[in-house]
């Protein structure tokens, strides 16, 4: 390992270790009350699911010099946990949704679903940035950073038209949490593919990132759906099972749209890439 890799490895080890201990430490004091079981179980599983996703990516889809090197696999696992837990902190900064205050302390199920979707969305973006050959960790950070910034900006855009953050944290709208959580995961999947690919240059990475354009119609769809439910809520004082089924439908529809879009990316990537001159 080079000096910068050792520095990143040590920093990631310390920060990810501290974050994991803090994450599970916050879950321990929760009393075994019936209403808290779902919160505790879901939050306990999220880091484990993330581990499996990241390990699979590193073992089978990452750069040729990483897939069989267990030191580098450990390196990128720790970097991944650092990425995700920093992202969770930024979710509080940019989305005003806290996994501690809203989920644990307030037992807000809407926030739980949203945080879960966001957690997995962050993992998807990081994993996508690890797909393909590249000369170093900074390639992953740069490519993933494009996806991360876009993900946060688009989430803020949805909120600016629909006020989803307030409806989740203040109104505790579980149905809104289901839809927005599904959107965060789906947009993470699309942006993960946009971050993936072999490294050639910073310029080409930005150009190749444009294959993530389906996230824009997905965002427009999410805004229209939320506006529809806002109008519907004003006309009805009670929420019934149709809201649940409808919200689950849209959450799955977002994810299905993302998966279909990802399968189509290889068909549209090469023409864009081939038309751009090499710049280093």
Image (cartoon, rainbow, N blue to C red):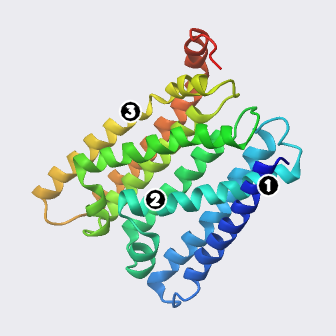
Q: Is residue 44 above or below residue 58?
A: below
In the shown orientation, is residue 13 left or right of residue 248?
A: right
Q: From mark 3 to mark 1, how far is it between C-alphas?
A: 38 Å
Query: Dot 1 corresponds to which residue?
Result: 6
| N-term-proximal mark, 3 vs 1 | 1
Q: Mark yes or no: residue 114 visible.
A: no
Residue plotted at (64% across, 71% down): 20
Residue visible at 48% across and 63% down? 89
Label pair 3/1, CB-CB below 8 angstroms: no
Q: Position of residue 46 (x, y in %)?
A: 60, 64
Q: Secondary structure at mark 3?
A: helix
Q: Which mark is residue 216?
A: 3
Closer to viewer: mark 3 or mark 1: 1
Query: Dots 2 and 3: beta carbons under 8 Å?
Result: no
Distance, label 2 to label 3, CA atoms, is 22 Å
Tell me the residue that label 2 is attached to: 90
Q: Earlier in the sequence, mark 2 or mark 3?
A: 2
Q: Secondary structure at mark 2?
A: helix
Up-down relation of residue 87 to residue 56 (above or below): below
């Amino acid at each position: 390992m080079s000096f910068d890799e050792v520095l990143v490895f040590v920093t990631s080890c310390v920060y990810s270790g501290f974050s994991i201990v803090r994450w599970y430490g916050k879950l321990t004091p929760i009393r075994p009350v019936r209403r808290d079981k779902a919160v505790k179980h879901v939050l306990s599983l999220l880091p484990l699911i993330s581990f499996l996703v990241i390990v699979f990516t590193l073992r089978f889809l990452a750069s040729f010099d990483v897939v069989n090197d267990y030191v580098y696999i450990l390196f990128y696992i720790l970097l991944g946990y650092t990425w995700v837990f920093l992202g969770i902190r930024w979710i509080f900064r940019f989305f005003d949704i806290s996994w501690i205050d809203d989920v644990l302390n307030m037992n807000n199920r809407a926030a739980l679903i949203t945080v879960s979707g966001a957690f997995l969305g962050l993992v998807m973006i990081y994993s996508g940035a690890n797909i393909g050959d590249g000369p170093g960790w900074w390639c992953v950070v740069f490519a993933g950073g494009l996806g991360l910034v876009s993900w946060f900006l688009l989430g803020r855009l949805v909120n600016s038209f629909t006020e989803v953050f307030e409806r989740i944290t203040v109104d505790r709208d579980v149905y809104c949490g289901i839809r927005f959580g599904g959107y965060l995961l789906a947009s993470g999947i699309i942006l993960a593919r946009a971050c993936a690919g072999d490294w050639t240059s910073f310029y080409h990475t930005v150009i190749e990132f444009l294959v993530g354009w389906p996230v824009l119609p997905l965002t427009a769809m999410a805004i229209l759906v939320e506006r529809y439910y806002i109008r519907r809520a004003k006309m009805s004082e009670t929420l019934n099972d149709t809201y649940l089924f409808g919200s689950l439908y849209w959450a799955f529809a977002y994810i299905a749209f993302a998966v279909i879009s990802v399968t189509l990316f290889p068909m549209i990537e090469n023409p864009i890439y081939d038309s751009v001159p090499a710049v280093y």
